[in-house]
Image (spheres, helix red, strand yellow):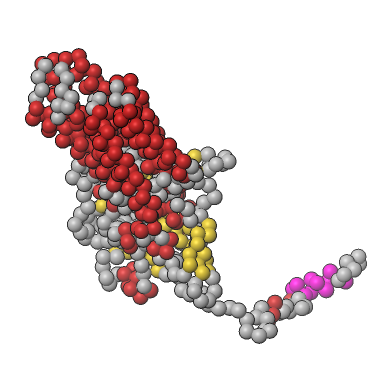
């Protein structure tokens, strides 16, 4: 049914730390890998090695330049995937009932065997979280790795979304945002987590943590901060290398510059 | 938004068809026999042809019947249901008019109301989109219904109704363009609200070097280059020329020319309706 549930038992979602994300795109690749090899239609590519490559991704990383009113400019890497909105406009527009929001955990999913590929849900989403797969003709979106998080065949530490498991910087956190005592909820409270496009009234479950202001590293006066680091620690090799160095020097035909 | 030809054909043709059915339903005109047959064949061909054309852009047209199930929440589903109801009601009305030589007045009025409701549900598919501020406006259902009734009046050969409705449609079109031009700015959605980042934000690098589904479907910038010229052409063909012909040459030949002009104008204006519509997702890419 494409009517939204009045409330969900839990609100599973992601908290993305824009301060920590280094923009490596590892989560993009692990997401594409997991979701191509597992649940649902694979995420296809069109002309992948040609002049005009294109493909379906459930998670994409933008980069934004921030110029604060005062202080240093900075770059923020900005991962974006489905926010599993409480008031998801993509679900209610679906004419077939293929899109739905789960009552038990709030995950927004697409039943691919009912999807007619009309694309209206992608129009209704302000975040660009849904992409039509060109090969399969059905709508693809983040499943919050529903086939990992409850999967008892996986070791416990792997029962989180693929992007979260992969992130080398620890910028992605997964948990129940409906429970105010959960680690993710506390992180949001502590760091001032915010919603994307709150004026659209979608009530996203996923939250973003703001980047901290960049520290001012401009040297004061003439001090070269790097100089102590650049000075060689040792001019002469010691130990085995020292012996080897001397032994090679002693051989005839040594290079002139030694 | 990407102006898909199948969707432009769908909204224009089925709009005309349901407009015709609305006029035939209220008995204005009230033909019987072969004349009625001609009118109803044209009306049904336009309405059904438009609906069939709309399935061409689907990823899985063979599953289109599923779209009738979610009428409680989805305008697209409601549109499908209303179209089927209208076609059934007006189908029976047409049968009695063509072969029985009688007009079932109550059935006709019900069918006419249902035809107008169908056009309303079509327009709401677009007008409900908060993500496309230009569409999220009452002028969209107003314009869709006015144009449908104008085209219907024209194709059923009614000079007076056509003249008045052309004026109304022209006013609504001007208002739709006027309101639409400031809509994105007035929606309050900006790159700052989209990213929540502090200070002045600028898109530095997109997620990929090539294009993607979102950009081809939602960020159609190509067609906006000649928007002003196309507006003049659309308004001329859709409203001004047919109005002039209705007043100066109110004869059958003039009417056919006026109708052809009007349909061409409807196609151009519907193309602009999509091409000029900006989706908020473009903000993430530093585009509109």
Left or right, A254 with reference to B122: right
Residue B1 vs residue A5, the one in the foreground = B1
Magenta includes B155? no
Residue at the image point whose x is 48% and y is 64% from the top: B201
Q: Is residue A141 visible?
A: no
Counting from the top left corner in percent of width and height, residue A247 is at 83, 71
Residue in the image at 40% along x and 65% along y: B196
Q: Residue B87, how many percent across, how many down?
A: 19, 28
Horizontal side of residue B156 vs B6, given as left or right = left
- The stretch of residues the image draws in magenta is A240-251
Give left or right: position of A134 versus A3. Answer: right
Residue B13 x/y as whole percent: 31, 30
In the rendered view, would you say B176 is above or below B255? below
The quarter in which the C terminus of chain A is drawn is bottom right
- In the picture, residue B52 is in which quadrant? top left
User: Is the stretch drawn in magenta largely helix, strand or loop?
Assistant: helix
């Amino acid at each position: 049914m494409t009517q939204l549930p009045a409330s969900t038992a839990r609100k599973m979602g992601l908290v993305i730390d824009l301060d920590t994300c280094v923009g490596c795109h590892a989560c993009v690749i692990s997401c594409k890998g997991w979701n191509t090899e597992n649940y649902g239609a694979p995420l296809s590519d069109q002309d992948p090695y040609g002049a005009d490559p294109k493909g379906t991704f459930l998670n994409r990383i933008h980069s934004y330049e921030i110029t604060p009113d005062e202080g240093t400019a900075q770059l923020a890497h900005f991962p974006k995937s489905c926010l599993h909105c409480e008031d998801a406009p993509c679900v209610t527009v679906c004419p077939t009932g293929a899109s739905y929001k789960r009552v038990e955990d709030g995950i927004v999913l697409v039943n691919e065997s009912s999807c007619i590929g009309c694309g209206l849900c992608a129009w209704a989403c302000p975040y660009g979280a849904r992409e039509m797969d060109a090969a399969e003709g059905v709508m693809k979106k983040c499943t919050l790795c529903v086939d990992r998080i409850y999967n008892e065949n996986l070791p416990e530490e792997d029962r989180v979304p693929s992007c979260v498991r992969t992130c080398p910087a620890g910028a992605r956190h997964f948990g129940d945002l409906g429970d105010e005592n959960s680690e993710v909820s506390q992180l949001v409270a502590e760091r001032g987590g915010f919603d994307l496009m709150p004026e659209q009234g979608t009530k996203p479950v996923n939250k973003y943590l703001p980047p901290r202001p960049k520290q001012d590293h401009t040297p004061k006066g003439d001090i070269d901060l790097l100089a102590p680091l650049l000075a060689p620690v040792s001019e002469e090799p010691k130990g085995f290398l020292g012996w080897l160095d001397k032994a090679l020097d002693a051989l005839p035909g040594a290079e002139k510059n030694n | 938004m990407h102006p898909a030809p199948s969707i432009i054909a769908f909204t224009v043709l089925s709009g005309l068809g349901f407009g015709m059915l609305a006029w035939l339903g209220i008995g204005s005109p009230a033909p019987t026999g072969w004349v009625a047959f001609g009118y109803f064949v044209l009306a049904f061909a336009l309405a059904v042809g438009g609906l069939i054309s709309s399935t061409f852009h689907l990823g899985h047209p063979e599953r289109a019947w599923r779209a009738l199930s979610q009428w409680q929440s989805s305008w697209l589903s409601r549109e499908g249901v209303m179209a089927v109801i209208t076609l059934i009601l007006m189908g029976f009305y047409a049968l009695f008019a063509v072969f029985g030589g009688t007009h079932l007045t109550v059935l006709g009025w019900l069918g006419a109301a249902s035809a107008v409701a169908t056009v309303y549900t079509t327009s709401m598919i677009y007008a409900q989109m908060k993500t496309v501020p230009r569409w999220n406006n009452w002028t969209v259902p107003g314009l869709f219904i006015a144009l449908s009734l104008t085209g219907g009046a024209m194709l059923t050969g009614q000079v007076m109704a056509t003249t008045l409705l052309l004026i109304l449609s022209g006013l609504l079109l001007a208002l739709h363009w006027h309101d639409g031009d400031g809509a994105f700015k007035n929606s309050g959605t900006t790159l700052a609200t989209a990213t929540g980042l502090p200070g002045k934000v600028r898109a530095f690098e997109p997620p990929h070097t090539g294009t993607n589904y979102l950009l081809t479907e939602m960020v159609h910038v190509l067609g906006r280059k000649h928007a002003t010229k196309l507006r003049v052409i659309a308004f001329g063909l859709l409203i001004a020329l047919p109005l002039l012909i209705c007043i100066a040459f109110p004869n059958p030949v003039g009417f056919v020319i006026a109708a052809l002009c009007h349909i061409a104008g409807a196609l151009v204006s519907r193309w602009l309706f999509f091409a000029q519509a900006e989706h908020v997702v473009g903000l993430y890419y530093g585009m509109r």
